[in-house]
Image: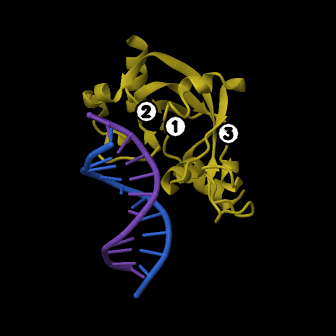
Chain colours: A yellow, B blue, C purple
Amino acid sequence: MCARNINKQLTSTSQYWLMKSEPSVFSICDLFNRPNKIEPWDGVRNYQARNFMRDNMQIGDLVLFYHSNCAEPGVVGLAEIASEAYADPSQFDAQSDFFDPKSTPDNPRWLLVDVRWKETFAHTITLQGMKQMPQLAQMQALQRGNRLSITPVTPAEFNWVLSTARSA
DNA sequence: GCCAACGTTGGC
DNA sequence: GCCAACGTTGGC
């Protein structure tokens, strides 16, 4: 076993995540329409978000799928982590917006995981609504100034959002 | 489109 | 290692 795997076992902290996507770029409907409903989550270019994928995510972890930078920002559905972290191919593609000339296949800087659709909520759990919920007052994704596209979610927060979505 | 907040870059 | 300049995110 390599050091990284040992580290992952020791430091794994979350089974639940919130992942943001701009629906004009990639929405939960786009995920639903993918073959096998799976999409490689490419384009993450933030070290903290990368480290979550590399060090803490595990296959089967559940994901709150969040639409950002749109008319009604909020959690729109549920997905799951469907792969270990691996090199993001777009970093090697000179035609891609995500091209990184400083990265090499021998030592890739950026990783991704595959994400699989599980559920699309009947109603969006809006950012505005979540801000009113005392149960979510500590939720990392809701803290002022937070811009991370991937954040851990506690089991209590996750269960609250999911039960709210399903009872709406 | 504005702009606050934040991350990254690079000169020194 | 500091920090100013710059780029990006994302709510509004």
Residue type, mark 3 in image: Ser
The residue that disc 1 covers is A15
Whether pointer 1 and pointer 2 mark residues with C-beta atoms closer than 8 Å, the reply is: yes
Q: Residue at x 43, y 22 (%)?
A: A162
Image side of residue A135 versus residue A63, left or right: left
Are discs 1 and 2 located on one and the same chain? yes
Mark 3 element type:
loop
Q: Nearer the viewer, residue A117 or A159?
A: A117
Q: CA distance from mark 1 to mark 3?
A: 14 Å
Q: Amino acid at mark 1?
A: Gln
Q: Disc 2 on helix, strand or loop?
A: helix
- Do discs 1 and 3 share a chain? yes
- How far apart are the two marked residues, 2 and 3, measured between alpha carbons? 21 Å
- Could you tell me which quadrant the C terminus of chain A lies in? top left
Discs 2/3, front: 3
Q: Which mark is residue A155?
A: 2
- According to the picture, the residue beneath numbered tag 3 turns out to be A83
Is A15 located above or below residue A34 in the figure? Answer: below
> A78 above or below A8?
above
Badge 1: chain ID? A
Rate crowding at label 3 as few (under 14), some (14 to 19) or many (20 or more) other CA atoms within 10 Å. some
- Give the amino acid at mark 2: Pro
Q: Is residue A87 visible?
A: no
Looking at the image, tell me whether mark 2 or mark 3 is earlier in sequence order: 3
Picture coordinates of residue A10, whole percent (x, y): 55, 53
Q: Chain of mark 2?
A: A
- Looking at the rendered image, the quarter that the N terminus of chain A falls into is bottom right
Please state the horizontal and vertical placement of residue A72, each as a whole percent of the image: 37, 26
